[in-house]
Structures are given as C-alpha cells and as structure tokens.
Amino acid sequence: MPKIEIYGHATCSYCKAAMRFLEGRGFEYIYYEAKLNEEKREEMLRVGKGRTYPQIIINGTAIGGYDDMMTLDQSGELTILLTKQGDTIHD
C-alpha cells in the first residue's frame, strides 16, 4: 500500500471529500489536524504544495489539494502514484 498523508482541518469540506474519495478506492491514509496543531501546520507548509487545506502527500510526493488529486485521477496519473511503492521524504 502507498503511504498517503493528508494535512487538513476538521471542518474542511475538501478534506472530507479527499478522504471519502480515497476510502472509496480502498486506500488508507494518515490524517494530520494541521489547522489546530502548529507543528503539523509548519510541517504541511514545508512538505506540501500550498497553504490551503487539504495538502495530500503520496509516497513523499506532494500532489496538492483535492482538486489537484481529481485532475491527476482524470489523467490516470493518480493510479500510477497510488500503485507505486516508495520511500517517503518524512515521517
């Protein structure tokens, strides 16, 4: 299984949509509450692609947010990322 990390916050509808999408595809992920946790927010800014929620990291590759994930899904690139095993850039 790929290592999927989501930095988000509890009331974010895009965060919830990203989690539902991944769960619907049978993928597990690690969720970090970044809005209320300064350490995780700083980590998100360091490893993510933006300042908005969610920030999604797959096997150490920052893909951006929910819309970015949907664009990758439509192009077929998300399937490639999700089926690769790989090292992550952080824990």
Image (spheres, rainbow, N blue to C red):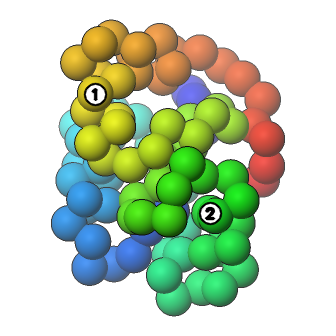
Specify the amino acid type for callout 2: Met
Q: Is residue 43 left or right of residue 49?
A: right
Task: Name the foreground residue: 49 vs 16.
Answer: 49
At 20% from the left and 66% from the top, the residue drawn is 13
Residue that numbered label 2 is attached to: 44
Instruction: Using the numbered discs, state the Cα–Cα distance from disc 2 to disc 1 in whole angstroms.
Output: 21 Å
Where's residue 88, x and y in %? 75, 37
Q: Which mark is residue 71?
A: 1
Question: Under tag 1, what secondary structure?
Answer: helix
Regarding residue 5, the answer to whether it shows in the image is no
Quadrant of the snapshot with the N terminus: top right
Residue 72: quadrant of the picture? top left
At 51% from the left and 20% from the top, the residue drawn is 81
Considering only order in the chain, which callout, 1 or 2, is on the residue closer to the N terminus?
2
Question: Under tag 2, what secondary structure?
Answer: helix
At 51% from the left and 88% from the top, the residue drawn is 36
Q: Is residue 74 left or right of residue 34?
A: left
Number of numbered discs: 2
Where's residue 20, x and y in %? 23, 49
Regarding residue 53, the answer to whether it shows in the image is yes
* Residue that sits furthest to the front in the current view: 50
Q: Is residue 55 left or right of residue 37?
A: left
Residue 9: quadrant of the picture? bottom left
Where's residue 75, x and y in %? 29, 13
Circles 2 and 1, Cβ within 8 Å, touching? The answer is no
88 shown above or below 16: above
Residue 71: quadrant of the picture? top left
44 shown above or below 49: below
Specify the amino acid type for callout 1: Thr
